[in-house]
Amino acid sequence: VSGGARAMVAAAFGLSLDSPEVEPLRQEFLDRYQEHCAVLSRPYDGIPELLAAIEKAGLIWGVVTNKPVRFAEPIMQRLGYAERSRVLVCPDHVTRSKPDPEPLLLACSQLGIDPSRVLFIGDDLRDIESGRDAGTKTAAVRYGYIHPE
């Protein structure tokens, strides 16, 4: 479910997004998710091989996510990516999240790389918009939150 925890909880309980019941359920969901977020997390098929090929080519990579750092860091650790990734940018690090280009521009700045030399790969339209507006090259994967239309 795209749209974050609020949309996920509303959909799961058949509530409208503006229902007063959504916020307490969202908070309970996030608290439970924090306890277990890394337990069943797995990379999409082909990602470990892709990252190995990127590293073998002497290139660097990083992660720009709309997932808060309290979830992103344990997942990165669990997958063995925390030590390999050169940058991790979460909403906690910026004032505006994707689709705004700010998170990508921060990652590029931290890496000392001009955005025009970056390929940003995403699984959501927000990723593609963020990459385009930051001046990176973009690519969309066919899984995640990308819809055929």
Image (cartoon, rainbow, N blue to C red):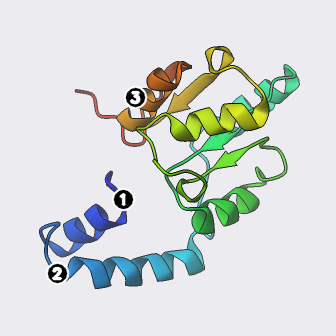
Compare residues 113 and 128 and report the one nearer the observer.
113
Label 2 or label 1, whichever comes before in sequence order? 1
When the figure is inspected, residue 100 is found, relative to residue 31, above or below; the finding is above
Q: Amino acid at mark 2?
A: Pro
To which quarter of the image does residue 86 belong? top right
Q: Residue at x 87, y 22 (%)?
A: 58
Name the residue rendered at 52%, 57% in the picture. Answer: 67
For the residue pair 92 and 48, the one nearer the viewer reads as: 92
Secondary structure state at the residue bearing disc 1: helix
Q: Is residue 4 left or right of residue 16?
A: right
**Disc 2 crowd, CA 10 A, few/some/many (<14, 14-19, 20+):** few
Could you say where residue 59 lies in the image, as x and y percent from the top left?
A: 81, 23
Q: Is residue 147 something that shows in the picture?
A: yes
Residue hosting label 2: 20
Quarter of the figure that contains the N terminus? bottom left
Q: Are marks 2 and 1 in contact (CB under 8 Å)?
A: no
For the residue labelled by badge 2, is the local secondary structure a helix, a strand or a loop? loop
Quadrant in the rendering for residue 110: top right
**Residue plotted at (68% across, 31% down):** 108
Q: Mark 3 highlights which residue?
A: 129
Please name the residue that numbered disc 1 is placed on: 4
Q: Residue 126: which disc?
A: none
Q: State which mark lies toward you, 2 or 1.
A: 2
The amino acid beneath tag 1 is Gly
The numbered mark, 3 or 2, whose residue comes first in the sequence reads 2
Instruction: Identify the residue shown where x is 55% and y is 29%.
Output: 121
Nearer the observer, disc 1 or disc 3?
A: 3
Give coordinates of residue 10: x percent, y percent. 21, 69
